[in-house]
Image (spheres, coloured by chain):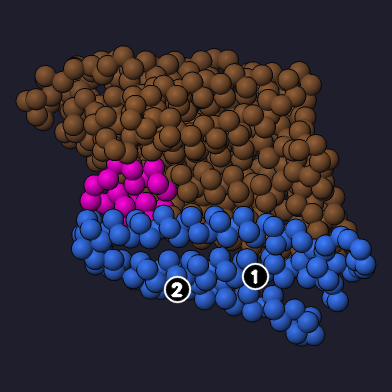
Amino acid sequence: MVHWLPLAAFVPLVAGALTPALAHGRPGLARGWALAVTAFCIFATAALTRRVALEGPFSYAMGGWAAPWGIELRFDEFSAAALFICVIMLLVLCFSGPYVRRAVPAARITWYYSLLLVNLGGMIGFVVTADLFNLFVFMELVAVSGYALVAVGGGRTAALAAFKYLMAGAVSSALILFCIGVLYALTGSLNMADVALRLATVESRAPVLLALAGMTAGFLVKAGLFPVHVWLPDAHAIAPTPINAVSSALLVKLGIIGLLRIFPLFGAAGVVSLAPLYEALAWLGAISILAGAFFALFQQDIKLMLAYSTISNIGYIVLGLGLAGELAVTGASIHVLNHALIKAALFLAAGAMIHQSGYRTLHDLRGIGRVMPWTTLALLVGALSIVGLPPTAGFLGKWYIALGALEAGRPGFAVAVLGGALLIFIYFARMLNAFYFRAPSHEEMLAVREAPASMLGPVLLLAALCVLGGLFGRWPVLLIAPGVSRLVGGG
Amino acid sequence: MAGLWGNIDYAAFVVLFCIGLYIIIAKQNLIKKLLGLNIMETAVFAFIVTSGMVDGGTAPIVGAGATGPFASPLPHALILTGIVVAVSITALALSLIIEIYRQCGTIEADELKGAE
């Protein structure tokens, strides 16, 4: 069916807006409704992904108005991320059931699911749109629902963390909108492919450079790269854990996908050279890998540790983009997807531990490996995967990025890739030690039970996907290969 | 220099944008930070709206006696959406500030550091 593409983006948005009305007086309905809508999105995006794998990228003209005048939705190889987004969202929603009953005030639970659906619709829209202003609107849908979700749990510092996140997010959004305005003033078009064509005839370089630099900076803030990551750890440590899984696994990736969308605009035009920008990205990425992993070493709070590890992994992705070779960009794109699976597995497993035991620091969680064996096992599989040991999913992206660094003749960056993995291995060893080999710090730890099935199921499934993503890593690589070669060839 | 004078409005919006950014970074009061954000957003909106201007252009309403050149209506439509986004962000931020004041008793960022 030709209308799957707009439906995938707009059904969750409309459903999210309807949730409070539907669940009015029937609060139990909200979760089932959200699960059903997300299942529909999985079905739709799976059909779209299948089509892109068979036929290549395709477009949909909104309202029948052809591009470049109408709004175009375009599903290309990178849009296949939408399938990952939907699968992770389904598992997060499944996990949320028991978790939010305790972590979120009862009156807000309906709103929690409503906001998650809006968030989902915004993310799908963001990865499939081919229109610059639409990109901004979907980005804001994701962002505004994200700010509210950080504060949804209530508590002493939740609103403050949400406010910080809002400020960082809104400033970067304003910057991106400003740059979209500059591009519109230069070219008179908002359609990405059309802008790329028209930029080639633009005479003055300064505004093009301004737009490129501003958009890159804006998207890097959204991605939480060091040193513009300051909003990230607070927002991640304080929000309810399922929200951490969504924001850490998916939201920060939108910044990266935004970069993947705008680089071809400038690369194809040839008005400006992207080489200095790529060089800067590679350095920022390498610094972020080491800084994020280094900060993670000093965290006692398991959620903060995972948040800093996200900063480190965003560093890997940005380094891969900056190296700009075919191997490195393949590695970066694969790591966008695989890190989403891994980080969702880690956060949900940590959330299950926090939910069952009530503790959240490594010291307090000592000995949990004996009372929650399955959750701990899933957490350790996720941790192995994030270190990047073969045959797990994390290995694939890092291996490609390291190969890309060698291919580009920059062995120093390959050393940064390995160094980051080693630092991450140290905190993995700390977790292993605390969970299995230390005597419990608290007597009550012995009475802690394994998580209920609706929490354990998603956690184990994600852990399994972390392994399968490595074993069957050839498929996503094959899927995105045409997209990568277009990106690298154009740039 | 002539180019700058010809685009004095653009220069003014960039200055306005930077004023907003300065307020967000330098001021401690959360309400002032939010005002700074609104100044920034206003600068962006004004910039995009003026980019639709055409010298001697009239309102782009097609009908009897309509003669060009017309001003571009697209930026106005875009900025309507942009304003809706900005209003919702402002509303959300204000409600967060109320919540912060209830929980912590202050809305000065430097005092909140101690409260964390």
Q: Is residue A157 magenta?
A: yes
Where is mark 1, residue-wise? B46
Chain A: give its colour.
brown
Is label 2 or label 1 in front? Answer: 1
Question: Tag 2, which secondary structure?
Answer: helix
In this rendering, is residue A447 above or below A329? Answer: above
Q: Is residue A103 magenta?
A: no
In this rendering, is residue A204 above or below A50? Answer: below
Q: Nearer the viewer, residue A82 or A331?
A: A82
Q: Nearer the viewer, residue B76 or A362?
A: B76
**Which quarter of the rendering shows the N terminus of chain A?**
top right
For residue B94, what is the image quadrant? bottom left
Disc 1 residue type (three-letter): Ala
- Chain ID, mark 2: B
Question: Tag 1, which secondary structure?
Answer: helix
Where is mark 2, residue-wise? B23
In this rendering, is residue B77 above or below A313? Answer: below
- Chain ID, mark 1: B
Q: Is residue B70 visible?
A: yes
Q: Position of residue A39 (x, y in %)?
A: 52, 20
Q: Position of residue A306 (x, y in %)?
A: 36, 37
Q: Which residues are magenta?
A: A147-165
Separation of marks 2 and 1 at Cα, in angstroms: 19 Å
Chain B: give its colour.
blue
Answer few, some or many: residues within 10 Å of disc 1's Cα (few below 14, many 20 plus, some between 14 and 19).
Answer: some
* Residue that lies at the very extreme toward the left in this rendered image: A443
